[in-house]
Amino acid sequence: MEELKRVVLAALLHDIGKFAQRAKRPYSKDMEGEYLTNYKGKAGHWHTVYTDYFIENDLPLPKDIREDRSKVARMASAHHKPNHDDAAEMSIMIADRLSSGEREEHAHSEEPPSFREARLVSVFDQVQMGRHEFNPPGEWFHRLVPLDPQEDQFFPIQAKASGDPEEYAALFDSFMSDIEKISQDLPFDLYLEALATTLESYTWCIPSSTYKTLADISLYDHGFTTASIAQALFLFHKNKGTAPREKDEEDKFIILGGDLSGIQDYIFGISKNSGRGVSKIFRARSFYLQAVVRSVILSICQRLGVHGVCRLMDSGGKFMLLLPLLPEVQEKLSVLEKEVHSWFKGRFKGLLSMSLSWQTTLSQKDFEPETFRKKLDQTHDALEVAKLRKLKTAIANDGPVITEDYDEREGGNCTICGYNPSDVECTESIAKKEGQEVSLCRECFQQIVEIGANLPKKQYYTYADKGDIELFDGVHFSMLAKPPAHFQGVLAMETPAITPGMAHARIARSLPSITEEELMDNDWFSALDNENGEIPLEAGQVKTFGMIAAKARKKTGEGLVGRALLSFMKADVDNLGLVFSMGLGDRLSVARFSFLSRMLSFFFSDYLTTLCEQRFPDIYTVFAGGDDLFMVGPWNQTLEFALRVREDFAKFCGNNPDLTLSAAVMPAKPRLPMRKAAALVEDWLDKAKDSGPEKDKLCFLDEAFSWADMRDLMILGGNFEKAMEEKDRTRFTPSFVYRLLEYQRMYKRFIQENKIRFGRYLSHAHYDIGRNIVDPRGGNQVEVDMLYSIFAVGAESRPLLDNLHVPLYYAINRNRKE
């Protein structure tokens, strides 16, 4: 529907004039009488004439809507003086109010003289769960900078929420440079996604309003949610042949919720855990599931005739779409649910399922924050009920026995997944490509060869009616080195890196690969080659888990030392459901909900990927997005990474004590099956969350520590590590360090069992230190003082001694010779 395209585009851009006005760009002087409002003889809403100029003169448009430029400009600019009989203009006007959480407009809402200096107040600072109190206008705000995961400038800063007015002009110039890179040959939906990505990059930090309100809703989230509401509202009234009114009370909207269940069982349900090819499959499986969810959303949009702005939330295997409440929509969703259940049952044999729910309906009044929060809760509750009846329609139609592929198993099951029939062609191909003698099904083959191998290399992802990997409803996914030659049949095109003029796929895709420097270093070459079998090493080759573990070792004058161990890390945001349900109280508007979910996804997907690439290149991302992550890396680097993630997450949330992160880091040998490792580290994460009244902890060595304590223990571990490296000076031999470990065990038993004989730990430690460590010349006085502070005489408490096994574990394993 061509008119719907105009409505969606106009709604998305209706307030772009605020950006242009603050940047002192030109405006349409001849349209002042058409769009400006009048209140007590004073003209208002000047941004509308800037919006008109931008669309008429600056906005590149694709061919299939270019002739409608003036119609789009009219719809976008008239949202304060609409034609009340025009369903399109009224839909945008009302959507504008509802996005902001207001049913009615202020009679005169012109921005104050300081509107160019105002900056976006952090929504994260407003979350209150008992430990934090927000006092308007708040202490944390965002700088006026592009959204870039390469920098930490998207973290809020603590200061007065104001800045240099001239920053707007520079930001707008960069915005125009990028927007001109959007190809005008793109089909409308691809153009819309590329435009939305560009708008997000530059307007995420711009307050949508500074007039008599807390400037905490970004221009991007306001525009995107306005487009979402306007689309559903317009389709509802187009079907009725009416125009919406501000006072309407009937339900007009549906929230369609989707939830992918069984994600971790699917990702970690690998029978084989080692080898070059298998090391790629875990990240590939995680990415594949994102592609599957994307195909379901694309299918919904195609069937219902809606555009991608319907997505209120889409991350971590969950999504919420805003749709019109129409009988034909509900009928199509019922048909879709049956097909989704049938496809998932056939493809994943019950291991994965997609639950759908569209019981939550909304009126215009329900977008008021105090009511919208309850509607979100209803959607979550309905999804939980739907998850209790997984694959219900498929089981009702086909019975509980899964018979798919039953007659195709003469060659046995796939060695990797264990439930699909093996494929002779794929088995022979993987033997040639990866040197692996394994029986493979086509699905695992595609994940290893077409996804896992291409994730670090290919920069363009397409979803189309034809392609490499078939997903739901005939949607095919492909990874390309360059954009397709034509866009016929292409439903979506994205890039994993933020690329000017392109839609962005929020993908965490850090995969450690062999570097030229490692190949040229004899020690590292030998260590990596030992893990590679008979196949020659190549630069750019994805590292196996054995190779990643080897990077836990360190170079010394005697070669590589230290244990080659992995650490499995799992982390997630504490109490996130309550944060969304209660954290903002009655201020959770649809735009604030959009900001919270989108920025959390940005942190865990985009930012952490960049952090890994730049600071922790040997850490392997299994999944990261939404609000959680699972990483595998060299044991010591992963521990440091966990501390860095917690520190950065605190900065990202404005040091709000009600927004915290818990994690588990579990060291293990590289050949530990991933399935078992995932289960163990999940138990450790539960321990981190359940070890006391407060969460916000790290579990390491099966014990929960506060993040501050773990940082101190890491520093102490580094001191012991250095002392062991310099044992000729410090006299910290391995045998002495092991004796310290025994003294600490005696101390723990003395405290726990209250037995006198274990109380000898202190005299034994002091005797050992005095006899074997103290240097009369004072050459190791710093280290001796460190020991005496740990084993202090007469101390009421011994926090360092309580946890001495942690720094000793660190030092011993960093210096152990293999």
Image (cartoon, rainbow, N blue to C red):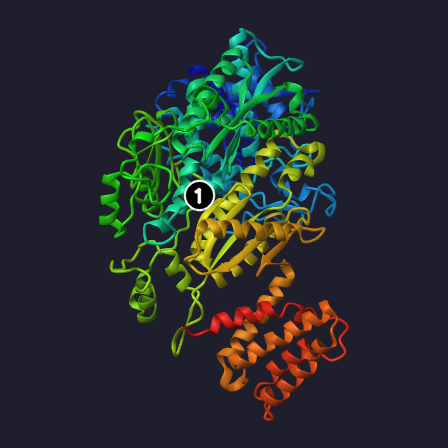
Picture quadrant where residue 21 is located: top right
Picture quadrant where residue 742 is located: bottom right
Q: Tell me which amino acid carries mark 1.
A: Ile
Residue 381 left/right relative to 220: right
Residue 168 in the image: state x and y as whole percent.
54, 41
Q: Nearer the viewer, residue 284 or 254?
A: 284
Does residue 712 lie above or below 765 as drawn? above
Residue 212 left/right relative to 413: right
Residue furthest to the top: 241
Which quadrant is the C terminus positioned in?
bottom left
Residue 427 left/right relative to 330: left
Residue 265 left/right relative to 713: left
Residue 306 in view, yes or no: no
Does residue 674 lie above or below 325 as drawn? below
Residue 270 in the image: state x and y as whole percent.
40, 46
Residue topped by disc 1: 267
